[in-house]
Amino acid sequence: MLKGHNMASTTFYRILQFLLLGTFILGCFVTLFLMYGKPFISWLSGPVKSTVSTDRVKNLFSTKSDKNVTTVLIWLWPFGKTYDPSLCSSLFNIDGCFITADRKHYIKSDGVVIHHRDISPDLSNLPPFKQPSFQKWIWMNFESPSHLSQLPGIENLFNLTLNYRQDADIEVPYGSIVAAEGEEDFVPPSKNKLICWIIHAYGQAFGKYTSDQDYFPTIASYDITEKLYNPLSVGTVPVVLGPSRKNYENFISRDSFIHVDDFSSPKELADYLLLLDKNEEMYLRYFEWRQHFKVKKAYFWAEHTCLACDYLRRHKEYKAFNSLDKWYWGG
Ligand SMILES: *[C@@H]1O[C@H](CO)[C@@H](O)[C@H](O)[C@H]1NC(C)=O
Ligand SMILES: *[C@@H]1O[C@H](CO)[C@@H](O)[C@H](O)[C@H]1NC(C)=O
């Protein structure tokens, strides 16, 4: 038994080695560059407005009297990096928002967005002032629970959650598949025939909470993150594992990816990848969905704070969230 298993895995690793040492290693570098270089480049050349938004001007001269303006305070810049928060109207068609990081607006802020990663290690980074009765605190986080430490004392502090989970109050997925109307035909990049492995690290979080029936189905979407949407958007075929094929198909086209579960052994998968490498027609089938759809990635973090504002404008009702630890970490 053991020996057979070892032999099978040795064969598998040989094949894998072959894969990696071939065209793949170069391809992966290209992919990595495209995946991580591109957002940076597009951020540099992206739409940067130098003009002061009218909302901002309005707000300088009026306070609560302007009932139609919703003020959202970014308490901490996510990961300490600033961004232009005044794009709600121009980029996302969300009007009536004043988004600011200037804490002098705290007292009139309808919402305060607090990024979990930047609060730690203790609560001393939280607003030290009383929360006005109309104000909502918004817990923002885009790390998976296995990559995020729990913070004692925040369980009952927040009113709303801003997260990639579908059951968050303000849901912002890492990406989504949207209609590609009136766009040029998608041509897979010339590095074609590349398959770069995307292995999800879902760590402890998975095994730890499998007993919690309600929790498990939602955690399954955790790993569908930028690790999936980035390769999809640059034109590679993701090979995925972890959440079931069905779960992935809720988010992306069934013929846009390869699921490890489709194969009975690592060798079968490796053989299939080798076959795909040689068969252009089969490979191109993974891009047929691009005739009608494209990948829309979230616009970090401007979109997130604009959507927070949009939510606050549409939901003025009382809301408290008193089970943050259970919801996100399972206990
Ligand atoms: C305030 O906003 C609402 C909808 O958001 C709109 O119907 C109304 O006309 C606005 N009022 C003023 C004074 O701008
Ligand atoms: C927000 O949540 C806190 C803590 O649960 C609560 O005291 C406060 O009344 C809530 N505010 C609103 C506007 O819902």
Image (cartoon, rainbow, N blue to C red):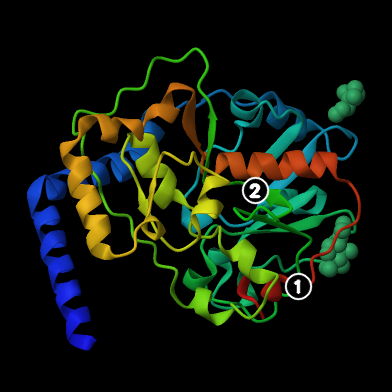
Q: Residue at x 61, y 44 (%)?
A: 304
Label 2 is placed on what type of residue?
Answer: Asp
Please give left or right for residue 323 compared with residue 3 in the image: right
- Spatial separation of the CA atoms under disc 2 and disc 1: 29 Å
Location of residue 44 by image quarter: top left
In this rendering, the answer to whether 27 lies above or below 20 is above
State which image quarter holds ligand 2.
bottom right
Q: Residue at x 55, y 54 (%)?
A: 247
* Of marks 2 and 1, the one in the foreground: 1
Please give left or right for residue 246 compared with residue 155 in the image: left
Quarter occupied by the N terminus: bottom left
Q: Nearer the viewer, residue 25 or 138?
A: 25
Q: Nearer the viewer, residue 62 or 202?
A: 202
- Disc with the residue nearer the chain's start (2 vs 1): 2
In this rendering, the answer to whether 133 lies above or below 56 is below
Location of residue 185 by image quarter: top left
How many residues crowd around disc 2 within 10 Å: few (fewer than 14), some, or many (20 or more)?
A: few
In this rendering, the answer to whether 153 lies above or below 20 is below
Image coords of residue 178 (percent x, y): 55, 30
In this rendering, the answer to whether 120 lies above or below 176 is below
Label 1 is placed on what type of residue?
Answer: Ser
Callout 2: helix, strand or loop?
loop
Please give left or right for residue 153 compared with residue 245 in the image: right
Q: Which residue is mark 1?
A: 323
Image coords of residue 7 (percent x, y): 14, 77
Q: Which residue is mark 2?
A: 102
Image coords of residue 142 (percent x, y): 54, 57
Please give left or right for residue 284 compared with residue 241 in the image: left
